[in-house]
Image (tube, rainbow, N blue to C red):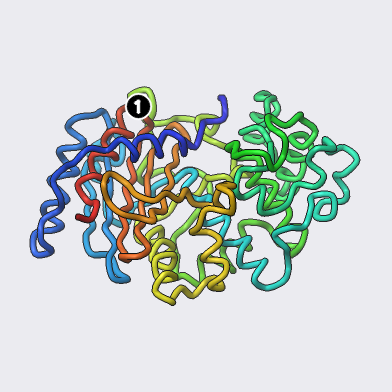
Amino acid sequence: MFLSRPLAALAATVLLNLATAPLAQAQSQADIGLNLSLSKALAGSQTPAIAAMALRDGKITQQAVAGLRRNDGKELAQLDDAWLIGSNGKPITAALLARLVDRGVLSWNAPLDSLLPELTERMNEQYRKVTLIELLSHRSGLPENFSDESYFETFHSDSRPLTEQRLAYISRALSEAPVAPPGSKVSYSNTGFIIAAVIAERATHSSYEALMQREVFEPLGMTQVAFGTTKAGQNWGHTQGKPISKASDSNPLMFAPAGNMNMRMRDWASFCLDQLAASQGGGKLLSAASYRLMQTVLPSGAGTVGWGVQDSLAGRKGPVLMHGGSDGNWFALVVLFPESGRGVLVAANAGPDMGADKAVQEVVMSLLPE
C-alpha cells in the first residue's frame, strides 16, 4: 500500500473550519449527552465506532463510546478498548526526545553528521547539518515518506530487530533529494520522526519501544499501550466499508515513531493531562523549558515541535495545541487549551473514506469549551 498520510493537514483543516455547534450538557448529564452525540455522529457515516473524552482541571470529566468493534459482528466497543491514534503519536515521540535533551543525552541543535556519523557518506549533503529540532518541527526538508513504496512494503515481512529496520529505512531515505532547502520552511515528514527515533536509539543503546516504555509510558501511568494495529478480538480498524484483513493494510511496526501506536483513551488522556498540567506549573515528564518548546511556535514562525499550535479555534481563544492522525483505517483528533486546562480527545475505528473524519469533527465540536 502507499504510506497513508497521517492527515495532520486534514485534521487542521477540519478543525479550522468548524462551525458553531451545541455544547456538552452539565456534568450530571455529561456522559449521557456525550453518548447521544456519538450515536448521532455515527448515524451520519459508515464509521462502526467512536470514542471521546473531555478533560478539565487535571482529570477526565466526560467519557463515552458508541458503536461496534467490527462492522461484521455484534460486539460493542468498550471504554477500555484500544484505538490506533496515528500521527497523534508524534507529540508523544517528541516528548521522549525532549526528555533525553533534558537529561543531556542529546542536544536540540546537534547536526545529523555528528548524530549519525556512520550514515554521513551516503547521506544527501543537504541533510548533514539538519538538527534534531528541525526533524521534529518538520523543517528538515525531507519528503513526507520515502518514495520507493515497494521497498517500504518489505518491512511488513522483515524479521530483523526494529532498530535495524529503522536504520536501514533512514539510510535509504536520507539519500533522497529534499523537497525544500533544509530549515527554509515547514514540510511535513514522517521520515523525520523515524530519524529522530534512530538518533535516540543510537545514543541510548535501547530500542525506541523500550525507551517509550521506560521514559514516557511508565512515568505517566500509561499501562496499556502497544505498537502497530490492535489484536484480534479487540476494536478493529476499517476501510472501504469493511474491517482490515492483512498486515499490509496498515503501516509496518518500524513506523511507530511517526505514528503507529494503539492505546486506551484513558492512556492517551494521561499524556494530554500532563501536557495541560505544564501550563499551571505542573507536568511530571519534562522540564518547564521543554514544555514551552513543545507548546509554542518557534521563532519567526519556524514550525512547532510535535504539536500543531495556533492562536484560536472555532472562535475559542487559544493558544490551542492540536493534532490529527490516521493510517487510513482509523481517525483521531486531539485539541488542548493549556491556559484553561481543557481538552478533547476523539477516536474512530475507520478511515476518512468511511466518513470517520466528519464523525470525529462533529463530536469534537460538541465538546469544545464555551
Where, by quadrant of the figure, is residue 361 drawn? top left
Picture coordinates of residue 272 (x, y %)?
A: 41, 61
Q: Nearer the viewer, residue 349 or 12?
A: 12
Quarter holding the N terminus is top right
Q: Nearer the viewer, residue 13 or 7?
A: 13
Compared across the picture, whether 167 is left or right of 33 comes to right
Q: Is residue 243 visible?
A: yes
Give the answer, above or below, for where 269 lies relative to 113: below
Q: Inspect the image, locate mark 1, and give the three-letter code of the amino acid beneath it.
A: Lys
For the point 19% across and 43% down, the residue is 38
Give the answer, above or below, for where 342 lies relative to 191: below
For the point 69% across and 25% down, the residue is 148
Dot 1 falls on a residue whose secondary structure is strand
The furthest residue to the front:
300
The furthest residue to the right:
121
Picture coordinates of residue 166 (x, y %)?
A: 71, 44
Crowding near the residue tagged with mark 1, few <14, some 14–19, many ≥20 C-alpha atoms within 10 Å: some
Quarter holding the C terminus is bottom left
Q: Is residue 256 visible?
A: no
Picture coordinates of residue 36 (x, y %)?
A: 12, 45
User: Mark 1 sits on what residue?
Assistant: 242
